[in-house]
Image (cartoon, helix red, strand yellow):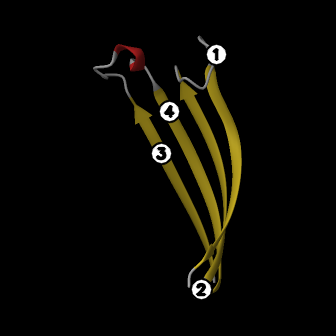
């Protein structure tokens, strides 16, 4: 069986009590294709697009953004 999934995540730390996190925002979109080979084995492929403002991942004054492709084989025994 095949499964197609989509997920949207967001983080808004606008009102954070920690001053260094003020204004931090992040969003990500994940599209996944999962293949259930049999009841004990599945293959998971994810494509993630992310964006962040005022994050520790970016140079000061710039936004962080990018794409990630992940794969995983899940074995259940």
Q: Residues within 10 Å of mark 2 (few under 14, many from 20)?
A: few
Question: Is 13 above or below relative to 42?
Answer: above
How many numbered discs, if any?
4
Question: Is 73 above or below relative to 55?
Answer: below
Q: In the rendered view of the protein, which quadrant contains the C terminus? A: bottom right
Residue bearing mark 4: 26
Residue 56, percent across and down?
55, 23
Do callouts 1 and 4 mark residues in contact (Cβ within 8 Å)?
A: no
Q: Name which of mark 1 and mark 4 comes first in the sequence.
A: 4
Residue 68, percent across and down?
69, 46
Mark seen at residue 59: 1
Q: Name which of mark 1 and mark 2 comes first in the sequence.
A: 2
Q: Residues within 10 Å of mark 3 (few under 14, many from 20)?
A: few
Q: Is residue 10 left or right of residue 2?
A: left
Q: Secondary structure at mark 2?
A: loop
Mark seen at residue 16: none
Q: Secondary structure at mark 3?
A: strand
Give the Cα distance between marks 1 and 4. Answer: 15 Å
Residue 58, percent across and down?
62, 21
Q: Name which of mark 3 and mark 1 comes first in the sequence.
A: 3
Residue bearing mark 3: 9
Give the Cα distance between marks 4 and 3. Answer: 8 Å
Q: Name which of mark 4 and mark 2 comes first in the sequence.
A: 4
Mark 1 or 2, closer to the camera: 2
Residue 74, by quadrant, is bottom right
Mark seen at residue 40: 2
Question: Is 47 above or below relative to 12?
Answer: below
């Amino acid at each position: 069986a095949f499964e197609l999934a989509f997920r949207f995540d967001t983080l808004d730390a606008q009102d954070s009590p920690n001053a260094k996190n003020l204004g931090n925002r992040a969003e990500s979109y994940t599209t996944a294709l999962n293949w259930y080979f049999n009841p004990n084995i599945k293959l998971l492929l994810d494509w993630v697009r992310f964006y962040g403002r005022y994050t520790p991942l970016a140079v000061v004054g710039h936004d962080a953004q990018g794409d990630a492709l992940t794969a995983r084989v899940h074995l259940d025994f």
